[in-house]
Amino acid sequence: MGRTGRARLRKKRTINANITKEDTFSALQQQLGMLGWRNAYALTARNFPSTGRGICSKTQNFCAGDRLISLPLKCLVTICTLEESSHFKSQFDTKKFHKDLKIPFQALLALYVLHEQHLEEASHINAYIKSIPKQFSTPYFCTIAELQRLPEEILEKTVAQNRVIRESYACLKNIFHNNKCCYCGKQYFDDIYTLTAYKWAYFAVNTRSVYVLSRQIKPEKCFFQTILTDEPNMALAPFLDLFNHSSDVQTNADLLPIGPNKQLEYVLTLESTKLASAIPPRKQLFISYGTLSNYTLLTEYGFFISHNPDDYFSFSLTDIEEFLKQDKTYSNIMLHRNKFTFIRAHNLHDEMFVHLEDGASHNLCVVLHLLLHEQSIYPNVLNQVAFGSAERLANVEAEIRSLVGYKINSYKRFVHDLEQLTALSESGVVAKGYLEECIRFLNDYLDKAA
Ligand SMILES: [Zn+2]
C-alpha cells in the first residue's frame, strides 16, 4: 500500500474510532440507566484539550455544595458484584484456597475485568469494559530503553508494582481450575487471562477505582473472603471514573441512602472550588483524588499537574550519599557508618523533601545536620541532637541548595538521554514531561530560597 493509501486508511480508522467512542458512552449511559441511574445533572463525556476525555454537564451550573453525581450502588462493580457472579466463582478451585495463596482485592477485581471482557456482548458490564482505555500512561508501561533512562525513584516504584502483579497473577493461576472456556475452547490462564492482559486490567483498576467502605456493602457470607489479604474497599465506578483530578477543587464521596427506598448511592459532592463563579455547562467538571504529589499522580495514575500546589520533591538517603560523594566541598567529611545506622533506625530518611511554601522538611535538615555538622558518632549524642530542640541544628540551607542543584543536573541528564531515543511511548512522553516539571519545581525552589 502506498503512502496515500496508508494515510487514507489511518484517516478512516480515526473517524471510526470517534464514532465508536461516542457509541461507547451512550451505550454506557444506557446500561447505567437500566440499573437505575437517572443522570439528573445531564452529565456527558467529551474530549477536552487539556486532559483528553472528561465530564461536563450539558445544562447545569455547579457551585460549592452541589452534588456532581449520584450513582446507585448497583452501578458500581464491588465485592458484591463478584459474589453474585456464579460463572466467575465457578472458575475458582476452592479446594486450593489456602492461607499462603492470598491476593489483594485489587488483583481479584482485575481478574474480574478480564472475565467480563472475555464474555464480550454477554457481559452485563460490556459497555463499561469497552469504555476503559486500551492503554495507560504510567511509567510501568515504559519501554525497557525508557526505563533505563529514568531516575531510581521511578524505577523502584515500577519494580514494586511489578512484584505485586507477578505474585498475585501466579497466585490466581494456582487457585483456578485448570480448564478451558466452554465457549471458545481456549485455556483460561494460558490463552485468555494472559500476563499481558492482566497487567492492563491491574492498571485499569489501579487508575480507575474508588474507595468504598466494605463494611457498608459486603455480604455476610463472602466466597472470596479466605483468599483476600485486605478488606474489599475498592470498587469500579463506571462513568464516574471519567472525572479527572484537579488540585483546584475539593470533593467529598459518600455512600448514602437515597430516595423513598433508601437505596445506597455513591454521591460525589463539590465541597469547594477556586473559581469565583459557578462552573457553567460544557465546562469540564473535576474532582479531587486527594492531596497528591506529582510523583504519586505519575506512578499511580499516569499523569502530573503543572504547578501542582500539593507537590513536593523527595530525596532518598542514596541521593544524599551520591550528592556528597561527587561534591568536592564534602571530600574531607567522614561519613561514619554509625550515623547511617542511626538515621535508618529512626526512619529519619523518610519524609526528606522540599516544598515551595514550607521549605525543607525537618527530617531533611536533621539528616544533613547529622551527616555534615555533627562531630559525634555516639547514638546517645545523635539522639539528643536529632530529637532535641530545632535551634540546635546548624543552618543547612546552603547544603540543601547544593543538593537541589545536584538533582536538577541529574534530572536534566535523564531528559537529555530520553531525547536521544528516536521515539517515545505514551508513558515515555508523560515521564519526560514529569522530569521537566520536577526541574522547573526545583528551580523555583532555588529562586524562592535565594
Ligand atoms: Zn472463551
Image (cartoon, grey):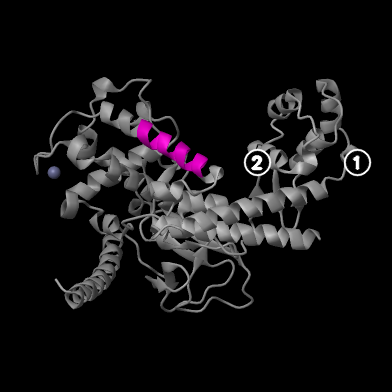
Q: Quadrant of the N terminus?
A: bottom left
Residue at (65, 50) in percent of width and height: 407
281 up-or-down from 379: above or below: below
- 3D distance between C-alphas at marks 2 and 1: 26 Å
Residue 108 visible, this angle: yes
Identify the residue at the far right of this view: 391
Of the two numbered discs 2 and 1 on the same chain, state the one appearing first in sequence.
Answer: 2
Quadrant of the picture in which ligand 1 is shown: top left
Residue 388's x, y, as percent? 87, 33
- From the image, tell me which residue sits under label 2: 319
Identify which residue, 432 or 122, lies in the foreground: 432
Q: Secondary structure at mark 2?
A: helix
Residue type (three-letter) at the residue carrying disc 2: Asp
Residue type (three-letter) at the residue carrying disc 1: Glu
Q: Quadrant of the C terminus?
A: bottom right
Q: Which residues are magenta?
A: 155-167
The answer to whether residue 161 is magenta is yes
Q: Quadrant of residue 369?
A: top right
22 up-or-down from 106: above or below: below
The answer to whether residue 110 is magenta is no
- From the image, tell me which residue sits under label 1: 391
Give the prevailing secondary structure in the magenta stretch: helix
Residue at (70, 62) in percent of width and height: 444
